[in-house]
Image (cartoon, grey):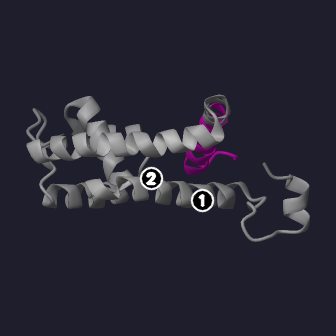
């Protein structure tokens, strides 16, 4: 662990920034790279894996469900879904409301997910062994709180209320 005072007074290579946003982005980048490295043999990146896993869990998923489930913006999600559809791992599902775009896994997508799951579990295990499951549970609780605060403040800001 690092000493926040040391980071703020004498930043060094490899130390985290005192800025919450920058620190989260730094950590996210390197953890994403770790998962991507483990998932490489499957041909999926962790972002693609997360989308496929969410669709598999839901059976069929609308864009709105995926946006909410993955906390991802519509533009990024639409781009990712387009690539996954192009690669033949997902397809559009018919929906009673024709205005709703729903997606489901193809047989190729289910196979890709089967190949990727143990590789994802390897990455997850690596991180949890190093961090510790108790420390991760604590971090997850804190990050969930941060997520709720940020969503609330952002929503209030969009509504023109005092942030």
Name the residue rendered at 91%, 56% in the picture: 5
Q: Earlier in the sequence, mark 2 or mark 1?
A: 1
Vertical placement of residue 22 versus 47, above or below? below
The one nearer the camera, 150 or 19, is 19
Q: Is residue 41 left or right of residue 159?
A: left
Dot 2 crowding, Cα within 10 Å, few <14, some 14–19, many 20+:
many
Verify whether residue 142 appears in magenta.
yes
Which element type, helix, strand or loop, lies under badge 2? helix
Residue 138 position within the rendered picture, expressed as x and y whole percent measured from the top left: 67, 31
Q: Is residue 152 visible?
A: no
Q: Main secondary structure of the magenta part?
A: helix
The answer to which image quadrant residue 61 occupies is top left
What number is the disc on residue 35? 2
Magenta span of residues:
141-163
Q: Badge 1 is on which residue?
A: 25
Residue 60 position within the rendered picture, expressed as x and y whole percent measured from the top left: 19, 34
Residue 25 position within the rendered picture, expressed as x and y whole percent measured from the top left: 60, 59
């Amino acid at each position: 662990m690092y000493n926040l005072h040391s980071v703020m007074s004498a930043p060094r290579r490899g130390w985290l920034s005192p800025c919450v946003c920058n620190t989260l982005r730094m950590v996210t980048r390197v953890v994403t790279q770790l998962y991507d490295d483990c998932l490489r043999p499957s041909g999926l990146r962790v972002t693609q894996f997360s989308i496929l896993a969410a669709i598999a869990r839901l059976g069929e998923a609308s864009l709105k469900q995926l946006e909410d489930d993955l906390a991802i913006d519509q533009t990024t999600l639409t781009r990712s879904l387009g690539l996954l559809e192009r690669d033949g791992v997902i397809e559009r599902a018919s929906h009673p409301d024709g205005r709703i775009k729903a997606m489901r896994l193809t047989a190729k997508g289910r196979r890709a997910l089967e190949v990727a799951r143990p590789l994802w579990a390897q990455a997850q295990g690596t991180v949890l062994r190093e961090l510790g499951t108790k420390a991760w549970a604590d971090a997850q609780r804190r990050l969930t709180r941060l997520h709720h605060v940020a969503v609330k403040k952002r929503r209030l800001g969009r509504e023109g209320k005092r942030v």
